Image (spheres, grey):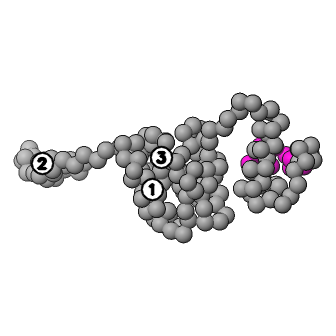
Amino acid sequence: MFSPRAESRLPGRFRRDLYFRLAGAVVQVPSLRERVEDIPLLVTQLLADLGRPDVRVANDAMLALKRRSWPGNVRELKNALACALAFVEASLIELCQLVHASEGQDALRPEIGFLGKTLESIEREAIVQRLHVTRGKKAQAAESLGIAVSTLYEKLKKYKVHET
């Protein structure tokens, strides 16, 4: 038979003496949703960890990050930043890049006031905003809007959107 000492060394078993030593020191770390004030510092560190210490986060994007509940805590925040970095061409993460990188995360979606706006004005605004984000690259803007490039050209003509 096994001795108690040999039993603690079996694969997949935790040493009892080590367990009791560690159990004496309990460290409680509150969830990220309870530490909203830490998010800007965490974002800076995570961007550095991701190899992009030169990238900043726009103010509206940072507010959206602070509003999110982050059920996955820091790991989820890191994943959201890593995805957003795929869309960053300059050194600034904007809200629309975070929204695109985090489909389904309602807290990161911008609050759009539809009251008093027509569907056409909302569509025009979305097109202009997407062209700004893609720096005038129509194929990329059309793809991110989920429409064909030919449809984008038709809408640009319809809404009288001129390149700047």
Q: In terms of secondary structure, what is the magenta stretch mainly? A: helix
Give how far apart the Cα atoms at labels 3 and 1 are: 8 Å
Q: Alpha-carbon distance for marks 2 and 1?
A: 33 Å
User: Is residue 150 in view?
Assistant: no
Q: Residues within 10 Å of mark 3 (few under 14, many from 20)?
A: many
Pinpoint residue 35: horizontal percent, then vertical percent.
37, 47
Mark 1 is surrounded, within 10 Å at the Cα level, by few (under 14), some (14 to 19) or many (20 or more) other residues, namely: some
User: Is residue 149 covered in magenta?
Assistant: yes
Q: Which residue is mark 1?
A: 40
Q: Residue at point 57% right, 50% down? A: 60
Q: Which residues are magenta?
A: 142-153
Q: Which residue is mark 2?
A: 24
Look at label 3 and name its amino acid.
Lys
Q: Circle 3 sits on which residue?
A: 66
Cβ atoms at labels 3 and 1 below 8 Å apart? no
Please report whichever mark, 2 or 1, sits nearer to the chain's N-terminal start.
2
At a point 57% along the width and 51% down the height, the residue shown is 61
Mark closest to the chain's N terminus, 2 or 3 = 2
What type is the residue that disc 2 sits on? Gly
Kindly report which numbered mark, 2 or 1, lies closer to the viewer in this rendering. 1
**Marks 2 and 1 in Cβ contact (< 8 Å):** no
Q: Measured from the top left, where is residue 83 in percent x and y? A: 58, 54
